Image (spheres, helix red, strand yellow):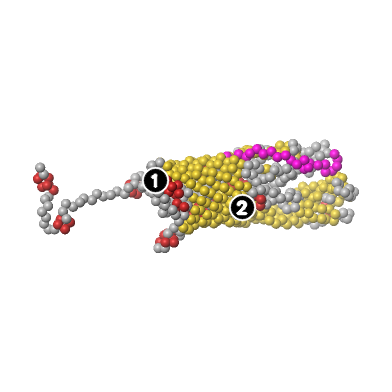
C-alpha cells in the first residue's frame, strides 16, 4: 500500500486570553473570582447579569503584558534535516529539541512579549430617564445596561499556525493569546435583589482556498502484511501556489444570574452589614467554536517506483487532487459553568474600611474538546500497472479524550476610604475631591484536562496554580465622576509532569532489526512538561455622573449606611420660643417691655 502524506494548514487554538488570564486589571488581581462581583464593564465576559448593577455610563481601558518560561522538549524524533525521513544515512533516528517560544515572530523586535494586548470595556444604562419618569411601582427598580468587553492583541489580530499533534506543544498556551475577542451583553436589574443578563462571544470564522504543487519521492521496504511483498511510502513536499482567506463573524451565547439578598431583607447590626455585602452569582458560557472551510487543489509531480516500474506521478494522477475540507475547528472553547459567592463586612466605627471575600467554582466540559487537525481521508487510485495506490490525506490521530475539570478560585479585597468618600460634600460644603484605595489578592487551582500522553500524540499540559494580586486607587471628582486606576498581576505555575510512553509505540515496522521511532517520540521514553507564565495588567476606569464614593455595584436606592460611610447630620436651624402668644405679639399694641428695658430693670 502506498501512503501519500499531505500536510495541510490547521488553526489550533483552545480558549482565549480572557479565559486563561482574565480581563480587566481588578478582576485579574482577584484571580477571576468575580462571578458574584461582576461590577465593571468586563462583567460582559464574567457574568452579564452584573451589568445591571451599573447605574452610570462607565468606560474602562488598559493593557496586558506577559512572558512565558515553559520547559522545552529534548530528544524528540522528527525530520531535522527535512529530507523526508526520520533516520539519518546510518539508520539512526533523527532527533533534536522542540522549543516552546510561542511569541509572534518579528525580526525587528527580538524582545517581543509572549502576551501583548489591549483591553477595553464600556457600560451604558438604557432608557433610564424614561423608566424613572413612569409612575409605576414595578418599574421603580428596573434598569437595562448594555456592556461590551473586548481583547485586541497588539501584534496580530488573527494568528494561523500549522501544528502536528505528534510533536509536543503546550495545547493551552501556544497561540491562544493571539486572538481578538468581543463580548457584547445586556444586564437587567429586574427586581430588588435580582439581576439577569445575556450576551454573546464573538470571534472570526475563516474560509480559505489553497492551490498546492508537490514534488514526490518514494521508498520501499518489505511489507509486514500476510501477503508479503514490498510496501511503498510516497513522501510529498508541497508548496503553496495560491492562497485566499475570508473572514466572517461567529457567535456563541452567554447568560448570567445575580442575587443580592441585602436589597430584599433589611437587618440591623452586623448581620445586616454582612447581608448587604453578600451576593450569589451564576454564569454560563456556551461552547464556542469557530470553523474553517478549505478547498485544496493539489498538483502532483515527481515519480514513483513500484512493481519494478517507474512512473511519473503526473501520469499516475492525471488530474489534480481536489480536496474539500469542511468545518475544521480553528478555535474551541468548551462549555463553562461558573458559580460564585461573595460576602464581606464593614470595619470600624467610622465605617471607612470594608473587606470582601469571593469564591468561584468553575466546571469546564473539556470532554467535548474537538480535534483541531484536518480530518483523516483516504482515496484509492488505479496505477497503469493495474495495482491500486492508496492516497492518504492527514493522519488518523484519534480523539484526544480530554476530561472535564473543576477549577477553584478565591479572591479577597480590602477597601479603604481615606477622605470624602460619600456624597456628603453637597451637605457639608466640603471639598469636591476624595480618595479611596483597594488591595486585592487571589488564588486559583486549575487542573489540566489533558490525559497522560502515553501514545503517539503529545498534547502537553499540567495542573496550574495561579497566584494573583493587585491594587486600585479611586479619585472622586464631583464635577466629572470617580476615576479609578488599577493594576493586577498573575503568575501561573505549571506543575512538573512526567509521562512514560507506552513501549508498544516503538516497533520494528520494516523487519530490519532496527527499532523505528515514530514522529514526535522522545528518545528517553518519557516526556516532561512544566514551567511558568507571568502577566501584568494596568488600566483606568471612569464613571460619568456618579456621586463621589457611590459604589458601582450598588443600586440607586443605596443609603449612606450601605455605602459604607457615615453620613453627616443635617444642620438644624435654632428656633426661638416666643415670649408671648403669637396673637398678642402681632397686635397693634403690646405690654411686653422692650429688650433694653428688661435689661435695665433687672437687678
Q: Residue at x 62, y 54 (%)?
A: 287
Can residue 538 be seen in the rendering of this structure?
Answer: no
Are the two marked residues, 2 and 1, in contact with CB atoms closer than 8 angstroms? no
Q: Residue at x 58, y 56 (%)?
A: 253
Task: Give the extent of the magenta segment.
Answer: 490-513
> Residue 30 at what x, y percent from top left?
52, 44
Determine the CA span between mark 2 and mark 1.
41 Å
Residue at image mark 2: 335
Q: Name which of mark 2 and mark 1 comes first in the sequence.
A: 2
319 versus 551 height, above or below: below
> Residue 301 at what x, y percent from top left?
80, 51
511 lies left or right of 366 = right
Residue at image mark 1: 565
SS at circle 1: loop
Is 31 covered by the magenta stretch?
A: no
Can residue 560 be seen in the rendering of this structure?
Answer: yes
Categorize mark 1 by other alpha carbons within 10 Å: few (<14), some (14-19), many (20+): many
141 lies left or right of 573 = right
Categorize mark 2 by other alpha carbons within 10 Å: few (<14), some (14-19), many (20+): some
Q: Residue at x 48, y 56 (%)?
A: 194
Is 508 covered by the magenta stretch?
A: yes
Task: State which quadrant residue 410 falls in.
Answer: top right
SS at circle 2: loop
> Residue 76 at what x, y percent from top left?
73, 39
Question: 568 or 457, which lies in front?
Answer: 568
Q: Residue at x 48, y 46 (%)?
A: 343
Q: Which mark is residue 401?
A: none
> Residue 557 at what x, y percent from top left?
41, 54
Q: Residue furthest bottom?
A: 135
Amino acid at each position: 500500500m502506498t501512503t501519500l502524506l499531505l500536510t495541510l494548514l490547521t488553526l489550533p487554538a483552545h480558549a482565549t486570553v480572557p479565559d486563561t488570564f482574565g480581563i480587566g486589571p481588578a478582576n485579574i488581581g482577584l484571580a477571576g473570582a468575580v462571578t458574584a462581583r461582576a461590577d465593571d464593564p468586563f462583567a460582559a465576559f464574567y457574568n452579564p447579569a452584573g451589568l445591571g448593577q451599573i447605574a452610570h455610563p462607565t468606560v474602562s481601558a488598559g493593557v496586558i503584558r506577559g512572558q512565558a518560561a515553559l520547559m522545552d522538549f529534548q530528544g524528540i524524533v522528527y525530520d531535522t534535516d527535512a529530507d523526508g525521513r526520520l533516520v539519518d544515512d546510518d539508520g539512526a533516528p533523527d532527533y533534536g529539541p522542540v522549543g516552546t517560544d510561542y511569541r509572534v515572530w518579528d525580526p525587528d523586535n527580538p524582545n517581543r512579549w509572549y502576551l501583548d494586548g489591549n483591553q477595553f470595556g464600556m457600560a451604558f444604562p438604557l432608557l433610564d430617564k424614561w423608566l424613572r419618569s413612569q409612575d409605576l411601582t414595578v418599574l421603580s427598580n428596573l434598569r437595562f445596561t448594555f456592556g461590551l468587553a473586548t481583547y485586541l492583541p497588539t501584534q496580530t489580530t488573527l494568528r494561523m499556525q500549522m501544528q502536528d499533534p505528534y510533536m509536543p506543544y503546550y495545547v493551552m498556551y501556544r497561540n491562544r493569546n493571539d486572538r481578538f475577542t468581543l463580548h457584547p451583553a445586556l444586564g437587567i436589574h429586574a427586581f430588588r435583589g435580582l439581576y439577569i443578563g445575556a450576551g454573546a462571544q464573538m470571534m472570526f470564522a475563516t474560509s480559505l482556498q489553497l492551490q498546492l504543487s508537490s514534488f514526490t519521492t518514494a521508498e520501499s521496504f518489505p511489507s509486514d502484511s500476510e501477503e508479503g511483498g514490498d510496501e511503498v511510502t510516497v513522501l510529498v513536499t508541497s508548496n503553496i501556489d495560491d492562497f485566499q482567506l475570508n473572514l466572517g463573524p461567529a457567535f456563541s451565547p452567554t447568560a448570567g444570574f445575580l442575587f443580592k439578598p441585602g436589597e430584599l431583607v433589611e437587618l440591623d447590626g452586623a448581620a445586616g452589614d454582612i447581608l448587604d455585602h453578600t451576593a450569589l452569582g451564576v454564569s454560563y458560557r456556551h461552547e464556542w467554536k469557530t470553523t474553517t472551510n478549505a478547498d485544496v487543489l493539489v498538483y502532483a509531480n515527481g515519480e514513483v517506483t513500484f512493481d519494478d516500474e517507474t512512473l511519473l506521478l503526473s501520469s499516475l494522477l492525471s488530474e489534480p487532487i481536489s480536496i474539500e475540507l469542511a468545518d475544521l475547528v480553528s478555535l474551541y472553547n468548551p462549555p463553562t459553568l461558573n458559580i460564585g459567592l461573595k460576602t464581606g463586612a464593614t470595619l470600624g466605627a467610622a465605617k471607612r474600611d470594608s473587606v470582601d471575600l469571593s469564591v468561584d467554582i468553575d466546571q469546564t466540559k473539556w470532554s467535548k474538546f474537538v480535534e483541531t487537525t484536518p480530518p483523516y481521508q483516504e482515496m484509492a487510485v488505479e496505477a497503469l500497472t493495474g495495482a491500486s495506490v492508496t492516497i492518504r490525506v492527514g493522519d488518523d490521530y484519534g480523539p484526544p479524550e480530554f476530561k472535564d475539570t473543576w477549577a477553584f478560585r478565591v479572591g479577597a479585597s480590602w477597601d479603604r476610604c481615606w477622605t470624602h468618600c460619600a456624597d456628603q460634600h453637597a451637605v457639608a460644603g466640603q471639598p469636591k475631591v476624595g480618595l479611596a484605595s483597594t488591595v486585592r489578592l487571589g488564588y486559583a487551582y486549575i487542573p489540566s484536562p489533558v490525559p497522560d500522553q502515553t501514545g503517539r500524540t503529545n498534547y502537553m499540559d499540567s495542573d496550574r496554580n495561579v497566584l494573583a494580586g493587585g491594587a486600585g486607587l479611586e479619585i472622586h471628582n464631583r464635577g466629572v465622576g470617580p476615576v479609578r486606576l488599577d493594576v493586577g498581576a498573575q503568575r501561573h505555575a505549571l506543575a512538573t509532569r512526567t509521562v512514560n510512553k507506552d513501549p508498544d509505540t516503538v516497533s520494528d515496522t520494516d523487519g530490519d532489526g532496527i527499532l523505528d521511532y515514530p514522529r514526535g517520540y522522545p528518545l528517553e521514553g518519557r516526556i516532561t512538561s512544566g514551567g511558568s507564565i507571568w502577566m501584568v495588567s494596568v488600566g483606568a476606569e471612569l464613571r460619568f455622573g456618579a456621586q463621589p464614593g457611590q459604589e458601582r455595584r450598588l443600586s440607586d436606592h443605596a443609603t449612606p449606611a450601605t455605602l459604607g460611610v457615615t453620613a453627616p447630620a443635617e444642620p438644624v436651624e435654632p428656633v426661638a420660643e416666643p415670649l408671648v402668644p403669637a396673637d398678642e405679639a402681632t397686635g397693634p399694641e403690646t405690654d411686653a417691655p422692650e429688650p433694653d428695658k428688661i435689661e435695665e430693670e433687672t437687678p
